[in-house]
Amino acid sequence: MLAPLAPACVLLGSCGDDGPAFGAPRGATEQGQDIFRLWQGSIWAALAVGAFVWGLIAYCIIRFRRRSDDLPEQTHANVPLEIAYTVTPLLIVAVLFAVNLRTLDRIDHLSADPALTVEVTGFQWQWRFRYPQSGIEVVGTDDHDPVMMLPAGETVRLVLTSNDVQHSFFVPAFLFKRDTVPGITNEVDLEVVKEGRYDGRCAEFCGLLHDRMGFVVEAVSREEFDHWVTKQRTLAAEARAGAFTP
Ligand SMILES: [Cu+2]
């Protein structure tokens, strides 16, 4: 069905079952896919307007091209036309605004019962991921980017803040970025739709070693996630026991 679009797909990005991507990631979360559809719809709308305008320009160039040195018939004002080209852009902007607002509302929606909560703290210059339900804490070091393990296909609540200056939690594949601000807690729900590893970065220049604030979000099956939780708890218990050994 998309065969006629093939040349455009090469120019504009990949074509999948959901149409051309126009250069954007398709979103690896439910929320990201919502944002992607908004992007895709906006580009289709822009192309439709563009095609209409280019068509009118082509029509005017051909239909009213110079045929002689005589001036064409001169007219003044066309009220219905002027109303139409004033109202139409206003309507387009109103529709885009409404659609944006609807997407914003959906991606900012917080579930009443998230399956998992992860407290994300940015600090100079690393990340701390804390799982309050299990007491697990993952902290990045100079040598190791921290990995946030999540169960795929489940709603995860991220609670974001900062210990010092402003940072920004950014996962390009999720089409998602949220600032971590000292003294302020930002909450967001994400549902990763496909298992995999997704690279993240700090997206707010936060000082000398800002570039080291990379991290990974790894979405796995529920079984793998539960296994990881058990393993982390065992390791933590062993570390505590070791610390108390005389
Ligand atoms: Cu930073």
Image (spheres, rainbow, N blue to C red):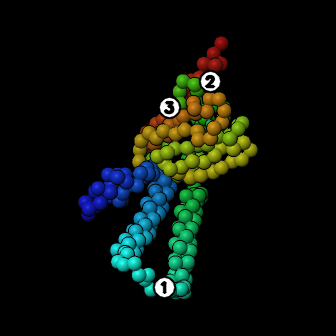
Disc 3 to disc 2: CB gap under 8 Å: no
- Assign a secondary structure to mark 2: helix
The relative height of residue 193 versus residue 240 in the rendered view (above or below) is below
**Where does the image place residue 67, in percent across and percent down from the top left?**
35, 77
- Count residues near mark 2 (Cα–Cα under 10 Å), then give few for <14, some for 14-19, many for 20+: few
Marks 3/2: CA–CA distance: 14 Å
Q: Which amino acid does label 1 sit on?
A: Gln
Give residue 74's mark.
1
Residue 180, percent from left and from top: 65, 44
Disc 1/disc 2 C-alpha distance (Å): 91 Å
**Hey, what amino acid is under mark 2?**
Arg
The circle drawn on residue 231 is 3
Question: Does 142 sit above or below residue 62?
Answer: above
Which of the marked residues, 3 or 2, is nearer the chain's N terminus? 3
Image quadrant holding the C terminus, namely top right
Judging from the image, what secondary structure is the residue with disc 1 in? loop
Question: What kind of residue is marked 3?
Answer: Lys
Farthest residue to the top: give it.
246
Which mark is on residue 240? Answer: 2
| Quadrant in which residue 6 is drawn | bottom left
Residue 1 in sight? yes
